[in-house]
């Protein structure tokens, strides 16, 4: 049976909004696995109730159900060991986990602050109240007060990316000589941003941008059927 | 022939000041290699002129001379493959490199800002003018203006350590199940700080502090003959 996963969509079902789902899109493309991406919205809780929780991505692999992007990646690696590895030499699980924690605590929030108004506008009407309420509780302020204009958000995003930028001066991918889960975790927010915003996150000559474009060219399957405001993420 | 390395000292030769040398102390202890740490000061440029540059650590391994803590670690791994590895499963060179770039761009500077007055006071008289001039050129301001009081520096240090803290919730070491170079790079600044300052960098219940203490207990050889203002780094 073909793999299936639930993927967060905007009002436009071809606009895919979750950085966590983007990780899985890249991981599946890297492992050369065919999978059906099922359009899902924040308030479609019943559709994924079978997973025992309420967030995407959720993967169905035959009888096996896995939620959480980290656990899904580990499942794909274990279940398909003959496919290209998500953990190439030099970059094991410990590396991908640290990159995940680094990205989620430093890079992801200023990107969200930048795209927040456009992200909110892109949502299906049924999701807007849920998104506002859950995010305002998390941020401790109104969405409008959490958002940052580009002239404030971009310097924060670019500064936060400095460890990645320095690493790419010495090796082509975050995972080393070959791309791996560490790369897919780090590239995912660029796709999330590009889905709803035409703002370029990086300067034209930023090596991080060259790395995004390299992954973009390498994994066309990851974005198949998806629509973007910025056709060149980064 | 025994390994020898040049190690930055304060006026008190038992106070060792370089976070880069502390990486090598831990790497040598982990690989169970005996080495002589030669007391060196910033202005002893002639003593290490044979290395073709002017900074420590410099390692002499028989006829081989290696400078730069990163290259020294890679040399030790290559030259002593039968000793415990610096790159255990899950944490290869790509991981250690990213941790290095993360640490140097986020954690190391606020620690320096915290300990700067005590660090400067600890220096040998012959080094003070050199240190002031080189660091003021690098920071673009006077040492006194780069320094931060504890109430400003500590929250920055603790926030910067969040990716490490989250990672330690899922695995005992940054390198995974076993410690590796990634851990030694990240623990080094705690020893640099403890050499000159009695200020605790972390809250008593911080998991990062438990990790520092675990490495402290595991590698007594790394600190052999060294004197500290804070006998419990962290």
Image (cartoon, coloured by chain):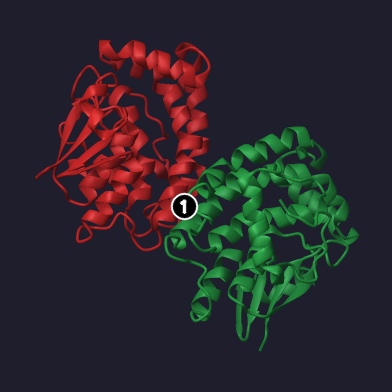
Chain colours: A green, B red
Relative to the observer, which residue lies in front, B232 or A231? A231
Quadrant, the N terminus of chain B:
top left
- Residue B193 position, x and y percent, is 35, 28
Q: Residue at x 85, y 67 (%)?
A: A13
Tag count in the figure? Answer: 1
Side (left or right) of A171 relative to B214: right
Q: Residue at x 88, y 64 (%)?
A: A12
Relative to the observer, which residue lies in front, B8 or A11? B8
State whether residue A115 appears in this view. yes
Side (left or right) of B118 relative to A87: left
Relative to the observer, which residue lies in front, A208 or B212? A208
Q: Is residue A160 above or below residue A224?
A: above
Quadrant, the C terminus of chain B:
top left
Side (left or right) of B143 relative to B25: right
Graded by Cα atoms within 10 Å as few (under 14), some (14 to 19) or many (20 or more), the crowding at tag 1 reads: many
In the rendered image, the residue lying farthest to the left is B1
Q: Residue at x 58, y 45 (%)?
A: A105
Q: Which residue is mark 1?
A: B167
- Residue A173 position, x and y percent, is 54, 57
State whether residue B234 appears in this view. no
> Dividing the picture into quarters, in which one does residue A47 lie?
bottom right
Q: Residue at x 52, y 46 (%)?
A: A169
> Dividing the picture into quarters, in which one does residue B231 lie?
top left
- Residue A41 position, x and y percent, is 80, 65
């Amino acid at each position: 049976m073909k793999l299936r996963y639930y993927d967060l969509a905007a009002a436009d079902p071809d606009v895919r909004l979750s950085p966590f789902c983007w990780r899985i899109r890249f991981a599946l493309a890297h492992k050369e696995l065919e999978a059906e991406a099922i359009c899902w919205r924040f308030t479609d809780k019943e559709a994924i109730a079978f997973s025992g929780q309420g967030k995407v991505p959720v993967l169905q692999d035959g009888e096996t159900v896995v939620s959480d992007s980290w656990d899904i990646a580990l499942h794909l690696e274990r279940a398909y060991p003959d496919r290209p590895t998500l953990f190439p030499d030099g970059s094991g699980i410990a590396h991908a986990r640290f990159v995940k924690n680094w990205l989620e605590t430093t890079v992801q929030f200023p990107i969200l602050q930048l795209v927040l108004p456009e992200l909110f506008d892109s949502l299906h009407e049924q999701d807007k109240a849920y998104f506002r309420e859950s995010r305002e509780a998390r941020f401790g302020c109104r969405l409008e007060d959490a958002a940052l204009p580009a002239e404030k958000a971009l310097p924060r995003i670019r500064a936060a990316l400095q460890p990645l930028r320095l690493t790419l001066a010495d090796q082509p991918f975050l995972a080393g000589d070959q791309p791996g889960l560490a790369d897919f975790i780090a590239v995912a927010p660029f796709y999330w941003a590009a889905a709803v915003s035409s703002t370029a996150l990086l300067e034209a000559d930023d090596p991080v941008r060259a790395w995004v474009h390299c992954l973009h060219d390498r994994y066309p399957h990851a974005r198949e059927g998806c629509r973007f405001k910025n056709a060149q993420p980064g």
